[in-house]
Image (spheres, rainbow, N blue to C red):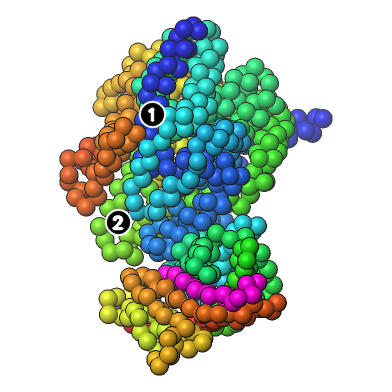
Amino acid sequence: MALLLLLALGVRIVFMNLDHPWDVGVWNGFFADLAHNVSPYETLENQTLDARSRYGVGHAIYYEGYAYPPLPIFIYYPLAKLYGTFYQLEHVNVTAGQLASAPVPWLFDFLFKLPIFLADIGIALLLYKMTKKNEKSMNMFLFNPYVIFISVWMFDSIAVFFLLLSLYFFERARYDLSAISLSLGFLTKFYPIFALPIFCLELIRRRSWRFLRYATIFGVVSMVFILPFLNGFTTSLSFQALRAPQGITPFSFALSGKLMDEQTGFQILYIIVPAIGIFALVTGMCLVYAHLAKKEISLRKKLLMTFLAYLIVMKVVNEAYSLVLIPLFILLFQEVDPSKRIRMYGGLVRTSYRILYHAIWIMPLTFAIFNTPITNFLGNFGVPVTLGPSTNNWFSPGLVVLGFLIIAFYITLWVSLLALKREKK
Amino acid sequence: MKKRDAFIGRLAKHIDKIIIGTSYIILLVFILATASSIRVEEKMIERGIWTEYRRIGNSYFTVMYSLNTGDNKPAIMSPSGDELLVVDGWESTVTVDNSSRSFWDHIYRNVSGGDEILHNMVWDNYQLRQTTRLHDNLLTMTYDFLHGNENGSNLQLDILHRYTKFTTVVIDNQTIHDASVENENTIYRLEISLSPKLTAENLPYWSIENSAGRFKLRLELENIAADYNWTTVGEISMSCEKMQK
């Protein structure tokens, strides 16, 4: 097993110099801020004001910088300081509307991605333990091409690790540790918070008052990290709320608003769709929680259904968001035969859980290959950055492919959710 | 204990209805929060009044003055409204005796009280103070200078302002951007007056450099005597109104 883990780490190190052209600029700026003891939230505010002044509020309400919860600041502070002793760190201040491409040294990629790789290992070990020491479960995650790709791009693995750890502790009745772990997941990326009602509802279903303690511990731990950065945290929430639709979601079709005049396009992208998005998010998630509240099915299934619903109702579904489903599907295969046939709507839908699992990661990976596009990850190797499919021509082959992937992914999410809903236990 | 057990039992029994009810309340709160801000914005449109948004910290200073038009009403309000004019601190510079630094690249001391905000930009051999006052529809920015060079100092301020394409900008009766030419939509008229005034006969204290969406005001003064007191070097006054087409 140790060899497999080392091999998995080695594979990630081989690919670690692949960087998303925009995000690497954000990470570089993030390291520059930390190395100089500057809050990245202050930089977000400054860059936002600069973007607004250059292009007007209509173009860029918020600069797409560090708009995450604060735990990564604590994780990366010592690494940024270490990096700063070797390299003169400066901001790569890319103004809104431009492409970023900042070749970065090998050491930067190594230090930034090391916690992500370790989180991958942690998820694999948790899967190993949670599937009765089944090495196949571990390998399914570690050597999944999509997982490797996301790990060299984004730090979702850290959030998913804490989420999975919270489930692990909950299943062993260590509720306080579960609440702390879930809070750490939320403090890394926002979406683990959608698991909080599931855990609390499970305790309520068991007629236990512990749900109050669970929620309180979650809240207290979260506040400890958030309070020092409260302004920045609320700015990040505003950023997320006001974001235009993007990614593998039908909300992205609203980007056709860009074909209209600037004011109408702005109204559609930054006013109407975010308003619909909030309505969809609140309604959709509450319906899921109401449905699952009294169900006597495993917590693992409930969490999988929760995050399937989350991806259905969100107006922004970037390619990395599907990562949370991978370990949950792997855990599902301990309860349900992956080859089990699924037939719905009089045979109109015929599939299996195995097919759904593979679709869940192949489609976002393919989306990223076309959308970014994939050559833009080679900036460190001198490959020039190019634009992805243009929204000036909605019938270009690239956009047709992306549109197809959006619809297919959305259907996959729905079929998965409905199939799980039909499972008896 | 029995009452508690009974309560949790009822809670577990009706939890789904509670969740649905809670979702209705959350949606209602969102609708009311957005609706109320729409009404406020409409009042502001009628009065055409500047609003001020301040964010001040140890290393961070932003004051934005905007005419809240109500055009943008996201569910969670952008607190600064619709910025009509922005003084760009990154691209505004202070040049003292041929040594140049951007506004942001100083040590700050900021004081805010009532109608006045004092923003001190401090460097080792000079201070520049920007005092901003807002009263009704008039915004005034005064620049004061303090230095210790006994031989006298030369000062050049380059202050970059950005404006929207829907804004007609008039500086000392000189129209530098006429929004009505390009736009069908509602436009805003920004009237700016400079002090000391531009002069035609002598070298102007102020000069204007204008390009799309931005104008830079340059103030040049020579041989400012060292003094323990602040010397007022220039003042910019602005008023704004909304013009219906």
Residue positioned most to the front: B151
Magenta span contains residue A264? no
> Magenta stretch: dominant SS?
strand
Q: Which residue is mark 2?
A: A257
- A162 to the left or right of B166: right
Boundaries of the magenta span: B143-164
**Mark 1 vs 2, N-terminal side:** 1
Instruction: Provide residue B65's location: percent of width, then percent of height.
Output: 52, 72
The label number, if any, that marks residue A17 in the structure image: 1
Amino acid carrying mark 1 in the image: Asn
Q: Nearer the viewer, mark 1 or mark 2?
A: 1
Where does residue A386 sit, x and y in percent of width and height?
26, 43
Q: Which disc is residue A359 wearing?
A: none
Q: Residue at x 56, y 67 (%)?
A: B63
Which of A149/B20 is in front?
A149
| Res. A26 in view | yes
Name which residue lies at 40% across and 23% down: A148
Read off the chain for label 1.
Answer: A
